[in-house]
Structures are given as structure tokens and as C-alpha cells.
Image: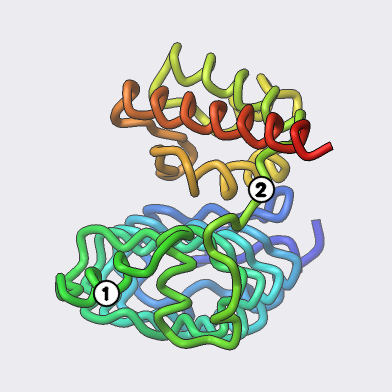
Amino acid sequence: MTNKEYVTVRGKKYYMRNGRLDLRRKGIKQISDIVGLDALTNLTSLSLDNNQITAISGLDTLTNLKFLSLNNNQITAISGLATLTNLSWLDLDGNQITAISGLATLAKIKILYLDENQIPANMLAKIQSIPGGSFGQKCVQYCETSFQSRDFRHPTSYTDLNQVDLLEKFEKIIKMSQKVKISTVAKSLNITDDELFENLLKWNEKLPFKIFEDFIIVENLNLFIQSLDGQFADWEQEEQDKLEKK
């Protein structure tokens, strides 16, 4: 291990593994308490859940970051994310955020969790009223970024046969357990954790599940199955339409 592959918090080392760093429940009050974090420029996933962080800062050099989880902290504002232009997943559940801002540069954001904050209902209603897309994309659109003309109705193509196969296997796993480890799912699908993460980003636009810590959680199995059946029906219709056009 080189000194660029780990950070220290109060003198204890925590290592980056496969581009991921897990610092949940470490009593961190400020991100600056994480010594060496700025050197982990290849970091793609950072989990800081269940700490005592009050502000998002000190992440400027982590430009390869795709997944950032800060749920259950004491954050009052969305800030300090301007350079994280590759970020596609942001979890800010369970904080003290009062307004949606600071997302204007996050053109790749797809998934955004903001439950259990102090955001006014009328602000959330404005975002919900924007047609199509995921909540994360809607929030960025609401911030009037340069990609207003993006077609949010069909952000991802779902006709890939490999996707169908993976989702059918994913459904079987979820039917057996509504709370399952991400690493377990990846092994069952015979793909890497990073490949699974990319797929989860796409699937979460259509299917009701949530990522919490290292787990995929489905709270309503019937709704999950109904949503998946609807997606399969849409795929079949897309393929039928293509055949009719030939």
C-alpha cells in the first residue's frame, strides 16, 4: 500500500478498496478531519453516512467520484460539489437541508435522495412537476443548467438483451430477500461491483428500491414486481414496434 491508498481519521488508517472508501459511523464532524482524502484522486465511491458532518467541503480534488453518500449527518446546505462533475449518485437523506441548490454543475447526476430534510414542500412540488426523468435529473434541470434541452423522457435505452437477462436474475434475488448485500448481488449476476453500480443507477430510474450502506432494499415487493413487469412489457412493445417498421 502507498500513502495515497488510505486516509487517517484520528490516527487510524482506512484503506481505499477498488476505488471505494467506507467511513460510515466514524464520529467525523468535518470532512477536513479525514487526513489524506484529497490525494485519493481515483476514488469513485465515498460513504460518509451516520457521522456528524455539518458542511460538504474538501472534496474538490475527487473529480472521479461517482457515488457520494452523506445520509444521516447534520448538513444544512448542498454545497462544495462544483468540481464533482462525474457524480451520478448523491444520497443526502436525513440531514437538515432547507433548500435545493449547489447542483448546477452536476450534469451526470441521476439519483438524488433528499428524504427527511427540511426542504419546503412547494420547492419539491416544482421539481415533481417537471415531466420525465429521475428526481436527481429533475433537480439539476430545476437549477437551470446548460442541458435544459435534454430528453428526460427516455434517459436510457432498455432494449439491451443483456439488461433483460440481468434484471430477470435480479428479480429472482429480490424475491428471495428484500434486503441483500450489493456484493452478493454482483456475485450472483457474475458482474463486478462497479458494473452492478452502473446498472443500479439505470434501474433505479424505473424500479422502486433504495441503496442504504452496503445493501439494496425493496420496501414494497409487490410494487417492485409490478414495476418490473411494466418495464418488461414496455421492452416487448418497443421490439414489436421496431419489427412493424421493418
Residue 53, how many percent across, how many down?
A: 34, 72
Q: Is the residue 145 above or below the residue 188 in the image?
A: below
Instruction: Locate the C terminus by quadrant.
Output: top right
Q: Residue at x 75, y 66 (%)?
A: 42
SS assignment at label 1: helix
* Count of marks, rendered view: 2
Side (left or right) of 16 relative to 26: right
Residue 176, how many percent across, how many down?
A: 45, 11
232 or 95, which is in the foreground? Answer: 232
Side (left or right) of 120 relative to 206: left
Which amino acid type corresponds to the residue marked 1 in the rendered image?
Answer: Lys
Task: Check residue 48 in the rendering and tell me which mark sits there, or answer none.
Answer: none
Instruction: Locate the N terminus by quadrant.
Output: bottom right
Disc 1 packing (10 Å; few <14; some 14–19; many ≥20): few
13 or 77, which is in the foreground? Answer: 77
37 or 96, which is in the foreground? Answer: 96
Dividing the picture into quadrants, the one containing residue 161 is top right
Which amino acid type corresponds to the residue marked 2 in the rendered image?
Answer: Glu
Q: Residue at x 40, y 80 (%)?
A: 142
Q: Is the residue 14 above or below the residue 196 in the image?
A: below
- The residue carrying mark 2 is 198
Mark 2 in CB contact with mark 1 (< 8 angstroms): no
Task: Check residue 126 in the rendering and tell me which mark sits there, or answer none.
Answer: 1
101 or 238, which is in the foreground? Answer: 238
Label 2 vs label 1, nearer the camera: 1
